[in-house]
Image (spheres, rainbow, N blue to C red):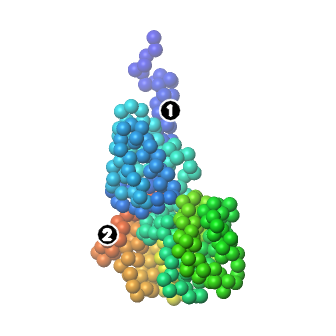
Amino acid sequence: MMNVGNPSNPLIKICIFVIILFNYCINVHSQCLLKFNDRTINISKYRKIAIFQEILNKKRINIDLAPLKIEGAWDRRWQKNYLEYLEKVTKFGITDAEMEALKNQCITEAIWDQWTGEPTLTIQDRAYLISYSLEGHDYDRVLWDKKPSKNSFWLMWGPFQATFGGVNKLGGILKLIDPSVLKDCFGQEFASIQTMINSDDKAKQYQIFQSVRNSSARKNAWTAGLQCIGTTFEGQDAFLNYALESKFWIGNGIRKLYNLIPDAKSHGTEIDYAFLMDIAIQLVIDDRKLTLAKKAIQPLFASNPHPPRWMIRKAIGDAMIRSISRSKSDRMGRNVIYYREAAGNKLSAQELKAWQMRSPFYAENFGLSDEKLYYPYGNTKAPN
C-alpha cells in the first residue's frame, strides 16, 4: 500500500513541484494589463476595451446577471459588475485565468486572451489609453468650422481632432484605409472624399469642402461617413498609426522629446514612452519647449549617466509647465500620473492636489512599468 503521508515519496515530490510550477506560470503570465478599481476611465465606445465589455455583458446574461450599457467608459459600476461575475462563477466552475483576475481585481493578460481571443494590448495601446482617457473625445465626434477660411481647420474628427484644413491630417489617415471601407462608409460621397485625400490643390479641396458644407444632406453624409470609419478597427488603427508616425503630428513631437534624453535608446522604459506621448498629444512641441526641457535634464545627467527615470520625466514635465501660460495645473496633474508611484513622498502638496483634481491614477494601472525597457525606434537592451 502506498504511503501517501510520506513527503519523501517521489510521486508526492513531483506533484508538489508541478503545483508550484503551475502557480508560478499563472503568476508570471497573468500580469495586470488594466487595473481601474473604482476610477472612471474614458475608453471609447469602439476600441478594444469595448469588446471586453461586450463579452462581459454576454457572460453576465448567461448566468442571469444584468448587463450594462456600453458608453465609452469603465467606471465603478463596470468594476463591480466584473468582480461580481468572477465571484459568482467561483461557485460553479471558474477558470484559472478568471481566478487570477479575481485575486488581483484587474483585467489580466490571461483573461484578456481567454475571453477575447484578440492579441494582447500592446504598450502603444495602453499608453494611448491613458491619454485618450484624459482627452475625452471619441471616434464619433465630428466638429465643423463655423467660419471656415482657406487656412482654417474646416472640420475635425476623432480623439485628437484630425483636421481636413491646414495640415491635411484627416487625408493622411484616410489614405491608410482600404478604399472599399471608405466606399462602404461614405457611399455617394466616396468620390469627393477621394479627391480630398489625393489632391494637392488646396483651392480645389476648399471648393469641395464649401459645397459639402453648404448642403445639409452632403454635410450629414460626411459626418456619418467619418463616424462609420470610427467604428472599424481599421479606421481606428489608421488614426492612431498616422498620429504617432507622421512627421506632421504627434509622432514628430515624441521623436523630438526622445532626442533630448541621452540614454533613451538604451534605458528608456514603457512609462517614458507613455509620458512623452501624452505631452506630444496635448502640446505643440516647439523649440522653446525643447530648450527648456534640455536645460532641465542636463543637471541630472551631469551627476549620473543614468538618472532615475521618474526624475527625468519630472524635469521634462516641469519644463512643459513653465512653457505654457494656461492650463498649468492640468498639465501638472497629467505629469504626476507618470511618476506618482516612483516618486513616493517626494512630490509637493501642489503636485498631489493637481493630480487628485485631474485624474488620480497611475501609469502602472495600465500595465506599464519602469522595469521594462522600451524604445519605439529600435529598442536596445540596457547593459548589465
Q: Which residue is mark 1?
A: 18
Q: What percent of the width, then of the height, locates residue 287?
A: 55, 87
The residue at the point 41 percent across, 72 percent down is 334
Amino acid beneath label 2:
Gln
Is 315 left or right of 378, judged from the image as shown? left
The residue at the point 60 percent across, 80 percent down is 211
Front label number (2 vs 1): 2
Question: Dot 1: what SS?
Answer: helix
User: 111 or 369, which is in the foreground?
Assistant: 111
* Residue lying at the far top of the rendered structure: 1
Q: Is residue 294 visible?
A: no
Q: What percent of the width, then of the height, locates residue 17?
A: 49, 33
Is 180 left or right of 214, judged from the image as shown? right
User: 264 or 103, which is in the foreground?
Assistant: 103
Q: What percent of the width, then of the height, locates residue 315?
A: 44, 78
Q: Earlier in the sequence, mark 2 or mark 1?
A: 1
The residue at the point 46 percent across, 49 percent down is 54
Amino acid beneath label 1:
Val
